Amino acid sequence: MKSIAYFFFMMVLWSGCRSKDDISPKTAPIDEVFGLKYQDKTTLKAEGDKFNLELSDIEDGRCIGKNIVCIWAGDISVNLLLDNTQSVKLRLNGLTLDKLTSLPASTPIESNYLKEVRIKLNNEPYIIRLESVDVKNLNEEQASLTPKENYTVWLKILKSTN
């Protein structure tokens, strides 16, 4: 009986883990989630052409830290560079690492920061979606002091129907 319980425990544990192969792959899969580290690049294959995608910047402006009084929850925003020319900005907002949400932008000034964005690759519509952000060794005094290399941004590229 113990071996059966152990087997199911290991299956649950294994299914919840992401493979390191999913982080900064040489070629990003379409319709699958993959991770990208700060300043890492991957290639998107779309309609026979290849496009470079780079995680060029990360800003962690969440209100996390000791002895901090917050008026606003803050957010994590990422900047992706497509073929070294087109900048794509995405954002997740939330209180804590486990409570990131994808609420719509609350003011027109923030409207260029969204969870997903529609782009054209070789005249075909695609969606780049920010699924989640993982952080290792988060600076407990102030989130923005955490080195950018500690972040993994999880993205999904989808073929759009319109």
Image: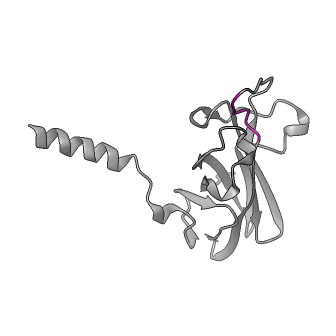
In the rendered view, tell whether residue 118 sits above or below residue 64: below
In the rendered view, tell whether residue 38 sits above or below residue 106: below
Q: Nearer the viewer, residue 79 or 83?
A: 79
Left or right of 123: which side holds 36? left
Can I make out residue 9 in this image?
A: yes
Numbered range of the magenta stretch? 61-66
- Residue 152 covered by magenta stretch: no
Residue in the image at 69% along x and 54% along y:
147
Relative image position of residue 127 (x, y in whole percent): 67, 53
Left or right of 22: which side holds 62? right
- Residue 63 covered by magenta stretch: yes
Relative image position of residue 69 (x, y in whole percent): 77, 23
Residue in the image at 19% along x and 42% along y:
6
Q: Nearer the viewer, residue 106 or 127?
A: 106
Q: Residue furthest right?
A: 109
Instruction: Name the chief secondary structure element in magenta.
Output: loop
- The N terminus lies in which quarter of the figure? top left
Can I make out residue 46 in this image?
A: no
Q: Residue furthest left?
A: 1
User: Based on the displayed image, in which of its 4 quarters is residue 155 positioned?
Assistant: bottom right
Residue in the image at 35% along x and 48% along y:
15
Q: Nearer the viewer, residue 88 or 162?
A: 88
User: Based on the displayed image, in which of its 4 quarters is residue 65 positioned?
Assistant: top right
Left or right of 62: which side holds 26? left
